[in-house]
Image: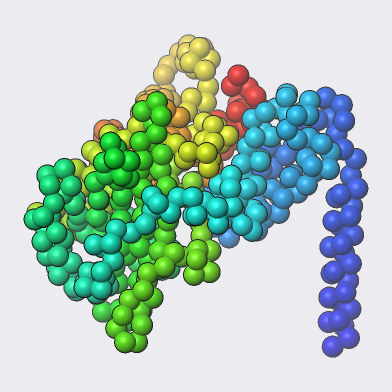
Amino acid sequence: MRLRIFQSVFLVVFVLWASASISALPCPRTSSQQDAWLGIKVDALIRSARALYENENAQNTYDRLLDEIVRTMKRCSLVDGSTFAIRYPEFVGYVNALSLARLDDHELGFNVSDEVYFAETQKYVTIPDFLSTPQFLKTVIRFETLSQAKALLREMNKSRSADEQLIFFSYESRHLGTPDNNNSFRRLLIVVPGNPAQHIPEKWVQFGLTDPGLRVRTRNVSVVAVVPGSDNTTNTYFKDYFRTYRRNGSIEIKGRWELGYGDDNCLKCHKSGVLPIFPVDGSVIRDELPFVETVNDRFLSYGPLRFERYLDLSKFGPGIGSVRMPEPIVASAKQAHGRSPSNLNATTTANAACVSCHHANGLGPLNWPMDSKVISSFVKGGKMPYGMELSKRERAKLYSQLVEDYFSIDDSHPGILKAWLLGKNR
C-alpha cells in the first residue's frame, strides 16, 4: 500500500517537474532560433497528425503536442502581430485554427463557442415540422417500418409543388456510423428543397435507422442546411439531434449538444459541406437509384463552400492531391532518369483530378483535420478521383501515395502540408 502511495506521489512530482522544465525552456528570440524551433515543431505536428489520421488512439498524444505548441507561442509572444507571425503567417494561423477545437466550449471547431453557433444558426438547422410529427417519427425508428415512412413522404409530396418535392431514399453508408452508434450504417435521407428568393435554406435531413433485429435503437437525426451566400458561394450549417424513446411510446427530439452529449468537429468529415452520397452497392432499391444521382447533382450545383463567419477555410491550407513538386522539377527528374515512371504519371493524373474539384473555390480542399475513413472509402472504394478507372491494387497504391505526399516531412522534398506551413508556396 505504501509503495503504491510513494509511486503515485513520485509520478505527480515528476509530471510537475517536467511541466516546469518545459515552461522554463528559453524562448527562440533570433530569426535563426525561431526558424530552428519552427522546423522542429512543424515536423512534430505533422508526424503526430499523421499518426492520429491512421490511428484514433493517438488522439491524446496529438492533443498534448498541440497544447504545448500553443503554450510556447503565447509564452514567447510568437502570436498574431509578432515578427514571427509576419514571417510565418501560415503556421500561426493554422495552429490558431486547430487549437479552437481544444477549448471546452468549441467542440465544433468554429471561431465562436458551440452555444453561440447553435443559437445563431438555429433558424437554418431546425427539423421541418412535417418530419417531426409523432406519426412520422414512429415509422423511422427501424428498418422494418421504413416502407411506412416512405408512404407518408409520398403522401406529403402530393400536396407539394414541383419545386418543393421531397427527394428521399434509404441506403447503407460505406464508412460512417451515427454519432450515437459507430456500428449503425442504415439511413433515410430526405432532401427538403429550399427557396433562395425567400431565404429558405435547403435541408438534408438524415435519420439513422436501427438495423433489423436489434433492440438498441439508433437515436441520431442530422441536418445539414445549405444557404446561398455572396459571390455565388454557399454557406453550410450543421446540427445533430438525438431521439429519446419514452416508455409510453412517445418520441422526443432535442439537439445532441443541448442534451449534454457534446459534439464533433464538423470540418473533420464535412470538407465539402454536404457530403455526396455513395451507398453500399445493392443497398438502394431499384426505384430509388435515380434519386441518388439527383441529390448528388444537386450537391454539385452548390457554389463554393463557406462557413460564413464561423470558420476561415484558408487557415487550413492546401489538401490531399495538391501539387507537391513544381512541374519544372518533375520534368527535370523525368529527363534525368531518361524515362517517365508509371507511378509518377498515375499520381500526377490523380492529383490533377483531385484539385480540379477540391480547392478553395470548389468543393473545398481535403486537408487536416480529416477523417481517414471518409478519404480511404472514397479513393479505395472507387468513387474518387471522379471518373478515373483504376484496379483495386492501383487504388490502394494511389491512396498510400496521396497520404504520403500530403504528410511527408522529408526536408529535401517536403510534403504538401509541410511546404505550406514553412511558407514555401508563396
Q: Between 297 and 369, which is closer to the camera in this rendering?
A: 297
- Please say if 364 is above or below 148: above
In the picture, the quarter occupied by the N terminus is bottom right
Residue 188 at x, y percent in the picture: 25, 60
Which residue is pictured at 85% across the width and 34% down the height?
Answer: 28
In the picture, the quarter occupied by the C terminus is top right
The quadrant holding residue 254 is bottom left
Which residue is pictured at 42% across the width and 47% down the height?
Answer: 237
- Please say if 366 is above or below 359: below
Residue 353 at x, y percent in the picture: 35, 28
Which residue is pictured at 40% across the width and 64% down the height?
Answer: 241
Residue 334 appears in the picture as rendered: yes
Which residue is pictured at 87% across the width and 38% down the height?
Answer: 27
Q: Between 38 and 115, which is closer to the camera in this rendering?
A: 115
Q: Between 167 and 365, which is closer to the camera in this rendering?
A: 167
84 left or right of 284 in image: right
The quadrant holding residue 248 is bottom left
410 left or right of 202 in image: right
334 left or right of 130 in image: right
Residue 279 at x, y percent in the picture: 26, 53
Here the colouring is rainbow
Residue 186 appears in the picture as rendered: no
407 left or right of 179 in image: right
- Please say if 243 is above or below 309: below
Residue 348 at x, y percent in the picture: 41, 25
The single residue placed furthest to the front in the displayed view is 198
Number of numbered discs: 0
